[in-house]
Amino acid sequence: MCGICGFTNATADDASVLRAMCDVMRHRGPDGEGQYLADGIAFGHRRLSLIDLEGGNQPLVRATAEKRAAVTSPALRADGTPCSDPATAFDTGDIALVYNGEIYNYRDLRAQLEAEGWQFHTSSDTEVLMISYLAWGEAMLDRLRGMFAFALWDRRAGELFCARDAFGIKPFYYTVADGGQFIFASEIKAILQHPTYHQELNEEALAQYLCFQFSALPETFFKGVFKLPQGHCLRVSADGSLSMRRWWKPEYRFDHQRTREQTADAIDATMRDSVRYHNVADVEVGSFLSSGIDSSYMAACLAQENPDIKTFTVGFAEYEGERDEISWARELADELKVSNASKHITEEEYWSVLPRVQWHMDEPSADPSAVALYFVDQLAAQQVKAVLSGEGADEFFGGYRIYQTPLSNRRLAWCPKPVLRAASGLMRHLGLRGANYLQRAAQTPEDWYYTNANGVAFSPAERDRLLKRPVSVPTPQQVCAEAYGEAAHLDEVTRMQYVDLQFWLVGDILLKTDKMSMAHSLESRVPFLDREVFRLSATVPTAQKVSGDQTKLALRAASQRAIPQSWAQKEKLGFPVPVVSWLRQDRYYRQVRDCLTGPEAERFFNTDQLVRLLDDHKAGVRDNSRRIWIAYSFLVWYRVFFVEQREPARPA
């Protein structure tokens, strides 16, 4: 895992710009640095070494494409010596590559390529990626099993080819500056170092963020800076024109003949295979461990590959009363006979690190668990360079309780929809509970569901009252409409999963996974988010995923092959963060109130609305913690990037 950056229309005078872009991402790759500058192309790379520690340096340049046995080497300096230390390369090879990620099946692909006559000069997955392109062209993307974001300069075609993995595990940002200059990077803060980009807030992104709690649009919070969508590739031609193509999208073909036990067997075999592939490295790979089944099952599978694995857990001592996350994890670690390092996060630690978390995130994140991830990644990085993490299990196998809603709605299928809507309106007017249930029973998911932010973030009407300058933007339902259209032939639960794959997973879950691990130069690997695991999950019918009483039915059954049944049936906690109680303490109430009424808040919001939310929360009238946190997180982020405009100091 690394950090990449680059731009077109480059000259020899741009070496210092390229260096600055690399330097601001030094946390992504402390083990090495390299630059390539030739043919008007600038490539920069920061390396975290995990595979082929000596030979996997980047940028990687192929000196000639005329013969299959041609030399492939790291980028070269002008004098011809390898550019494995911070220096700028001026080699003019036919192919140059910068890449962030891991290709877990690179050994399999290498064997295929060698059988076709290709020769290799390193043991790296980077070289396999490059030669895969030479051998198979754009079709190579369908053969890759892993996480990746890369840019490849093809001098022969005069084209820059960029691609992002199927699920969006690795980030790729880009902008097109005046004159058609294409600039890209693993982090937005690297693009901000380029003198042709002029920093400006995208207020449409803010409007959508208030409803989604994350950046939900292709265009980021920085005007003109875009995300290459997951499962897409992009070609940049010599004249600066862009051509984007979707190379992968989810497809479902349910197998109704397979019993739940047969499905569980298939899941177990596929997950063990995925964990085996994700354990490929020339360094030690550890695992996160929580009280939930996702990390528990994954850690148990890894322990069978390597009994000496290290596991890592964080929690909050005051949360959950009798049991916290750490005590559960230690109990399972003892059961699995693996080591477990843990840390209780104090209130002071949590609050003091918030500006630094927002700086690493690049865009505002209102997910309180991102901060918990920051600390567990910090803990793991003290002992290993890579960890396994359980993201993706909920979206693949039906893990969110919200997926049970269509099932509960069926109990009212006999009742006419207009009657349900009328009853819902009456109950809401009288302040009675159950109004939302009746309203959703009268609708389809397309009408109300737009990811896990539903009901906890601001509604469009609340957002418009909050914003001092409301902007005309699509509703959240309109933002998700295309995804729903693609999944129209599927049942309601699967349609919700499909939308989460396109928005929640990539915009919230995977973004914090990448940014928080990279903050500590740690690689986070996600075995559930494997092409083969998805291929199997897409055959599991909804009845084997979710019932009215339980979630992840088949996955829980599969996990019982590796962990005790009592653990396999445990409820999901995630990273429970006690923000609800903190915001009712005088100390944090005052801190947040000062922020919500400060000059930055006055610029964007009707602050009386925010103060009312905070006061009602403190008084216990209602739980407004998520809405407060959404506004507060944005303001912390805005101060870092637009007021102070510098990296926040590390907390003492």
Image (cartoon, grey):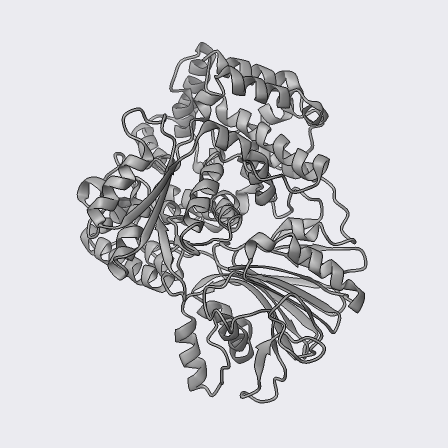
Q: Is residue 639 left or right of residue 356?
A: right
Count the numbered circles shown: 0
Q: Position of residue 648 (x, y in %)?
A: 63, 39
Q: Quadrant of the C terminus?
A: top right
Residue 467, by quadrant, is top right
Closest to the observer: 371 or 445? 371
Q: Is residue 300 left or right of residue 231?
A: left
Residue 228 visible to an observer of this rendering: no
- Name the spot of residue 20 as percent of width and height, x first: 70, 56
Q: Position of residue 491 (x, y in %)?
A: 37, 45
Identify the residue at horizontal 29%, vertical 29% (top origin). 411
Name the residue: 63% across, 56% down.
Answer: 185
Residue 375 drawn at (x, y percent):
45, 41
- Pick whichever, 212 or 627, lies toward us: 627
Q: Is residue 51 above or below residue 173?
A: below
Quadrant hosting residue 292: top left
Q: Is residue 312 above or below residue 164?
A: above
Dividing the picture into quadrants, the one containing residue 632 is top right
Residue at 72% in and 26% down: 603
Q: Is residue 150 left or right of residue 291?
A: right
Q: Residue furthest front?
A: 652
